[in-house]
Image (cartoon, grey):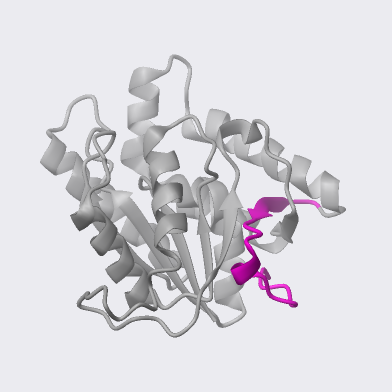
Amino acid sequence: MNILAVGAHPDDIEINCAGTLAKYAAQGHKVFICTATSGNIGSATLPKDEIGALRKQEAAKSAAIIGAEYICLDYDDELFYEDVNVRIDFINMVRHCKPDVILTHNPHDYNPDHMLTSKIINDIEVMIPIAKIPTAEAPCETLPVIYYFEPAKGMGFIPTDYVDITDFFETKKKMFLCHESQQQWMADNYAGYSAEDTFTADMTIQAQYRGMQCGVKYAEAFIRCNDAYRMTPSRLLP
């Protein structure tokens, strides 16, 4: 299958579903990682163009760990709004990937970029096969199934599906730690933050908690979008 993970910012994917993507890749599926923005406000010291370029490099390095293809739509971090061009860019990106499965943000989240990314993916899913919406990439022949990953801290999130990532938890951490500039930004803005202590501890607790719910050591959790035209009789998560 082709698997597409769409996040708003570099490092969103690693935090929320990198273990699942690593498992997909290990099973031989083709994985794409896309971010809507470049994360170009993620530095207390660097100019926007420099931090944007750096964060894209870090995202590409992370994706390469599992052999995934990284795509950045290059919109401005926290100043990301939808218009016709944005919608066309998203349609073209999805058509390029031709996904069987899309993993993306929960529609209910703390960050407007996260929520808008989720909304656009949901809005365009039925449009990607329609030839009268022209893009550089050819229309898809099938509709993907969409799964939402957790919002920050899992607040209010009741999963429908779990993925055992016990064998891929270290890969998930390795992918996140590629985002060195984001770790520095967090340290500059939040007293006492360190990637190893704060993030790794939070990530471990969350993965253990979801693992406890489904009977494994570490897991990632998802909500399956249950619109009738997206249903399939078989499980598509690994």
- For the N terminus, give its image quadrant: bottom right
| Location of residue 81 by image quarter | top left
Query: Is 201 covered by the magenta stretch?
Result: no
Residue occupying the point 30% across, 81% down: 131
Q: Quadrant of residue 24?
A: bottom right
Q: Residue at x 39, y 24 (%)?
A: 187
Horizontally, is 177 left or right of 46 in the view?
A: right
Asked if residue 177 shows in the view, the reply is no
Residue occupying the point 22% across, 39% down:
40
Q: Is residue 92 above or below residue 209?
A: below
Q: Residue at x 68, y 70 (%)?
A: 238
Of 53 and 81, nearer the camera is 81
Relative height, residue 2 to residue 214 (above, below):
below
In this image, 161 relative to 41: left or right? Answer: right
Q: Position of residue 149 (x, y in %)?
A: 59, 49
- Is residue 236 on the magenta stretch? yes
State the extent of the magenta-drawn residues as a range: 217-238
Left or right of 106 on screen, residue 182: left
Q: Position of residue 84 (x, y in %)?
A: 21, 55
- Report the number of numbered marks: 0
